[in-house]
Image: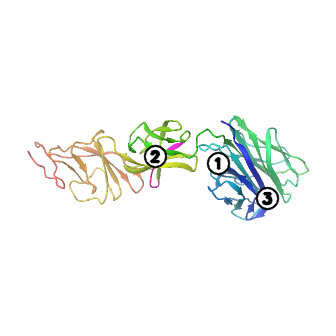
Amino acid sequence: MAAPTITDSVVAVGTGTSVTTGNLTIASGDKLYVGVLLSDGSPGAMTSVTSSGGGGALSSIGDSAAVQLYLRCHVWRSLSPTAGTVTITATPAASTGEIAVIAVAVAGVDAGTPNGTVVFANGNGLADATSASVSSGTDALVLDFIGRFLDGTFSMTAGGGQTILDQANYNNILSAGASTKAGAASVTTTWSRNFMGTVSNYEWVIGALSINGDSGGGGAPSVTDVDTDETITSTQTNVVVTGTDFDTATVEIRQGSTEVAQSIDSQTGTSIQFDVVFDSGATDLKHGAATLAVINGDTLEDTIGITIDAPSGQLYVDIGTPNTTSADRITATADLASGDQLQARGEGGGAAPTGLTLNSDATFYFTSGNTPTNFDVRAWSVADSTWGAWATQTVSSGSGFQAAWARGSNVLLGV
């Protein structure tokens, strides 16, 4: 696996409510990283960073917040920018005294895990500016962005092993630059000034990150099937998803706004094996129709419709309008509402009693010839998308009778 390479970079400086760069060349498959350096009395947040070419929107991946007295560093990224010749516009949330924008197009970036966390460092004085330590590797590239306040017109020199991509100065107040350095287990970058002057409070901020090389997979995944027939159970282990570009992918199961990451056991470029995560998160899945997504990175994914069944021998039903007066209603679980889901199993676990049927009005019955037996129930609440605890529904069959429940009645039929 090779380290990423730089396709192109561009820098622009200015003042006010936005700054737009000159032309930047983005090749097909490149990722786009943008550093925005702000200096002002209280440098603020960013409203947006946009590319004239469109494509995948840029989003913030790091913000130093205001540091020292006058500086702030923002780092933004797009994993799917439109290829071509573009300009980049950075728009702070408020008019800002000095703005520098440095955009970098990077080739050969891993789609599954494109980069590590942006780390920041800041300081002041005449000494060299030094970044925080960046965790990286030999198949990665470290990228940094620096801003210096009260820097005059003097340029900066990057430390050993660094390649300067761009640097510029605005109004003799803000100097900004970007550089790269080969990845290693731990990397720092440094910047020195080419003229020391007499000012002792040269403030600076550096944002740095490791950009990972392409692992050989990680493109847009394609899902072929899930366990052959797209049907799984809520407690199933070793579910097999087949397709392509699965090397570094993750798996989610989705129902509406509920998204639950699945527990992957093993994976190759064409297969993922996972254990179902159903009801152990902040929000839970329910039985029935769902969508399985295989995801590479932030934006590349493929989905397939699936069905989630209850474990073997267990039952479930979606609640329409609960019957609140029937003697045959479920009472072990309180406050059932329209849109909830009921699940039934045997008392203490296992298969539900033979002949048990759950109705959509939250009632139950046993078919003729089957002895009514206690069973456990629990409910998934539409209000918060979580499952309640199991509780036992007590069923009285009457002493001395072999009984069957008539649907909609509590009458015991003696035989």
- The span from disc 1 to disc 3 (Cα, nearest Å) is 27 Å
Q: Is residue 173 left or right of residue 346?
A: right
Q: Identify the secondary structure beneath mark 3.
A: strand
Disc assigned to residue 29: 1
The amino acid sitting under disc 3 is Val
Name the residue: 16% across, 45% down: 397
Q: Residues within 10 Å of mark 1 (few under 14, many from 20)?
A: some
- Quarter of image, res 236: top left
Q: Looking at this view, is 129 or 232 the one in front?
A: 232
Q: Is residue 393 left or right of residue 268?
A: left
Segment tinted magenta in the rendering: 249-257
- The span from disc 2 to disc 1 (Cα, nearest Å) is 35 Å
Give the x, y percent position of residue 288: 37, 50
Q: Identify the secondary structure beneath mark 1.
A: loop
Q: In the rendered image, is residue 77 in sight?
A: yes
On whether residue 413 falls in the magenta region, the answer is no
Disc assigned to residue 281: 2
The amino acid sitting under disc 2 is Gly
**Of marks 2 and 1, which one's residue comes earlier in the chain?**
1
